[in-house]
Image: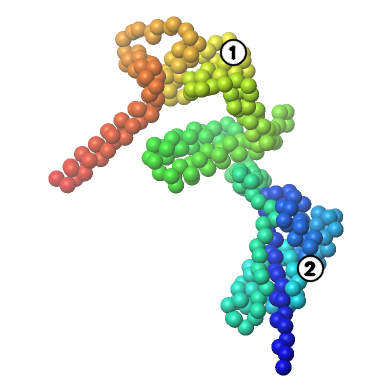
């Protein structure tokens, strides 16, 4: 008695796509598989990929088969591509797992084929979309202004600095997100300006152009061998862009006093200008001299004072602990 030849169970291809990539932009292996497949299925008649697949000559059937039906559809060496469409996909993959685990069914080959990939920075698109919805629907966020949010930008920047000084990686990631939120929030508000609107894309384009222009040693023909060369390029191109009347233009007077003093002495040194420090009695003159000395030594006076203040804080806590224990 001759045995019946085993039936080829075929192949199931789950084609995944990123919603952050424009519909129709698929990898070459994805297009090749779609054109060669015996059947292409999609449960969602409104799937954004469908018009592009059909335009490319791919026949797509609107169908939501069970796991058993999908296995049967592959019988005989057929390849069936499934374009995932949302929550129902979990039921299908769970069903396929149960069938495979039962040992009673000869399963088709199962392949997960990425049709498109997220590029670096793709989650920023999600952030922009979330911010759009919050701005439109949240009673608090929808009424915020640049002026009303300004204090939060300062607070978040300080919290970021603290996370850096603490060396806590999880805290650092969170605080970077909070700072990024401020940028996206302000850009979203700016879109609504009647006279001079701009968007987050305009913000990004501005900083991209600035970075390229200020790094001619990376994007142009100039060379820079040392950090000092890079700083010289930066200061020169910045001066050309701003065309300021004074080296002190653009130095925000509202920043912390030690940072302000260090920035002013740095600008004078870079000019270069021989400007003696003002002499006089009082703690302000002494602090200015200390900030200038720190800047000349390559030390951030704000960071140095914060580090010492932390040591002093810990000493206070230790003294409190000793006092309560006694």
Q: Secondary structure at mark 1?
A: loop
What is the count of numbered marks?
2
Q: Secondary structure at mark 2?
A: strand
Can residue 214 be seen in this snapshot?
no
Q: Residue at (65%, 36%) from the top-left corner?
A: 200
* Residue 104 against residue 153 in the figure, above or below: below
- Outermost residue toward the left? 326
Which one is closest to the eye, mark 1 or mark 2? Answer: 2
**Image side of residue 160 versus residue 56, left or right:** left
Give the quadrant of the C terminus. Answer: top left
Q: Which residue occupies the foreground of this view, 180 or 194?
A: 180
Q: Residue at (59%, 81%) from the top-left corner?
A: 102
Q: Which residue is mark 2?
A: 39
* Residue 236 against residue 152 in the figure, above or below: above
Quarter occupied by residue 73: bottom right
Q: Which residue occupies the foreground of this view, 112 or 21?
A: 112
Q: Residue at (61%, 23%) from the top-left corner?
A: 216
Q: Which residue occupies the foreground of this view, 181 or 217?
A: 217
Q: How is the image coloured?
A: rainbow
Q: Residue at (60%, 33%) from the top-left corner?
A: 146
* Residue 294 against residue 310 in the figure, above or below: above
User: Can you give x and y, in whole percent of width and height, for residue 168 in the image?
Assistant: 40, 44
**Image side of residue 39 versus residue 214, left or right:** right
Quarter occupied by residue 1: bottom right
- Outermost residue toward the bottom? 1
User: Can you give x and y, in whole percent of width and height, for residue 269 in the image?
Assistant: 45, 12
Which label number is shown at residue 244? Answer: 1
User: Can you give x and y, in whole percent of width and height, for residue 315 in the image?
Assistant: 24, 36
Which label number is shown at residue 113? Answer: none
């Amino acid at each position: 008695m001759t045995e019946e030849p085993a039936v080829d169970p075929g192949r199931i291809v789950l084609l995944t796509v990123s919603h952050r990539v424009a519909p129709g932009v698929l990898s070459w292996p994805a297009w090749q598989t779609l054109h060669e497949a015996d059947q292409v299925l999609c449960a969602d008649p409104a799937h954004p990929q469908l018009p592009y697949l059909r335009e490319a000559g791919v026949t797509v059937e609107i169908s939501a088969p069970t796991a058993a039906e999908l296995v049967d559809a592959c019988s005989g060496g057929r390849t069936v591509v499934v374009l995932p469409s949302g929550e129902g996909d979990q039921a299908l993959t769970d069903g396929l797992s149960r069938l495979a685990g039962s040992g009673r069914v000869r399963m088709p080959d199962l392949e997960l084929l990425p049709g498109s990939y997220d590029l670096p920075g793709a989650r920023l698109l999600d952030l922009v979309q979330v911010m759009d919805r919050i701005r439109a629907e949240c009673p608090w966020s929808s009424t915020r202004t640049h002026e009303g949010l300004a204090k939060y930008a300062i607070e978040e920047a300080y919290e970021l600095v603290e996370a850096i000084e603490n060396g806590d990686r999880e805290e650092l990631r969170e605080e970077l997100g909070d700072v990024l939120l401020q940028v996206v929030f302000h850009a979203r508000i700016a879109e609504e300006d009647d006279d001079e609107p701009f968007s987050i894309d305009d913000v990004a384009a501005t900083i991209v152009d600035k970075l390229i222009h200020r790094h001619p040693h990376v994007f142009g023909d100039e060379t820079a061998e040392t950090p000092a060369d890079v700083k010289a390029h930066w200061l020169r191109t910045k001066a050309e862009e701003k065309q300021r009347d004074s080296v002190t233009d653009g130095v925000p007077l509202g920043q912390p006093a030690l940072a302000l003093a260090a920035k002013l002495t740095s600008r004078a040194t870079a000019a270069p200008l021989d400007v003696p420090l003002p002499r006089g009695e009082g703690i302000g003159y002494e602090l200015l001299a200390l900030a200038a000395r720190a800047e000349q030594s390559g030390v951030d006076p704000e960071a140095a004072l914060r580090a010492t203040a932390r040591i002093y804080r810990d000493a206070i806590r230790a003294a409190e602990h000793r006092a309560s224990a006694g």
